[in-house]
Image (cartoon, helix red, strand yellow):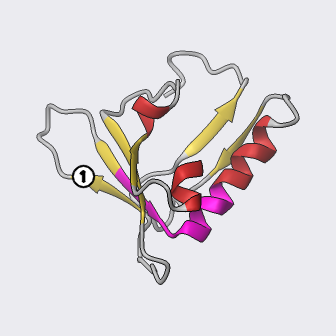
Amino acid sequence: MEGLSNGSSKEVELGSEIKARMDGLKALVLVAAPAQFTARKNLIKVPASPRELPSFRWENSTAGWKRAVGLVSGLIDPGEPGHQYFTDEEKDDALVEIAFREYRPPDLW
């Protein structure tokens, strides 16, 4: 997200960038949108065949990615377990939640 927030990256596939568990997903692509970006949705499900795991495209302006970096930093810096929500479940196609050091049973989802 840091590259998206400072303009050095335009698109990042999250699973290849960080060591993260993304249960039930094929891909989550983060995209830097133009500064005047005002989409109805920030997180969009990418069409796929019924047998494929879903993929999502998450677009944000540079300012939006800076906010996300701040949320991640606030979550990780204290070193304590916690989680943060990054999208709007009422508006977007899915809810993005980042959890840090929280125990999640494998069958939770």
Q: Nearer the viewer, residue 31 or 42?
A: 31
Residues in magenta? 57-68
Disc 1 designates what residue? 46
Residue at (30% x, 53% y) in the render: 45
Residue at (44% x, 38% y) in the render: 14
Q: Position of residue 97 (x, y in %)?
A: 59, 43
Residue at the far top in the pictured view? 106
Q: How many marks?
A: 1
Residue at (52% x, 24% y) in the render: 19
Q: Is residue 65 left or right of residue 29?
A: right
* As drawn, 56 above or below 80: below
* As drawn, 9 above or below 80: below
Q: Position of residue 86 (x, y in %)?
A: 60, 54
For badge 1, the amino acid type reads: Val
Residue at (47% x, 68% y) in the render: 91
Callout 1: helix, strand or loop? strand
Q: Position of residue 37 (x, y in %)?
A: 45, 79
The crowd level at tag 1 (other Cα within 10 Å; few <14, some 14-19, many 20+) is: few
The image quarter containing residue 103 is: top right
Q: Position of residue 26 (x, y in %)?
A: 30, 33
* As drawn, 31 above or below 51: below
Whether residue 16 appears in magenta in the rendering, the answer is no
Q: Nearer the viewer, residue 50 or 99?
A: 99
Whether residue 64 appears in magenta in the rendering, the answer is yes
Q: Nearer the viewer, residue 76 or 50?
A: 76
Q: Is residue 98 left or right of residue 82?
A: left
Res 7 visible: yes
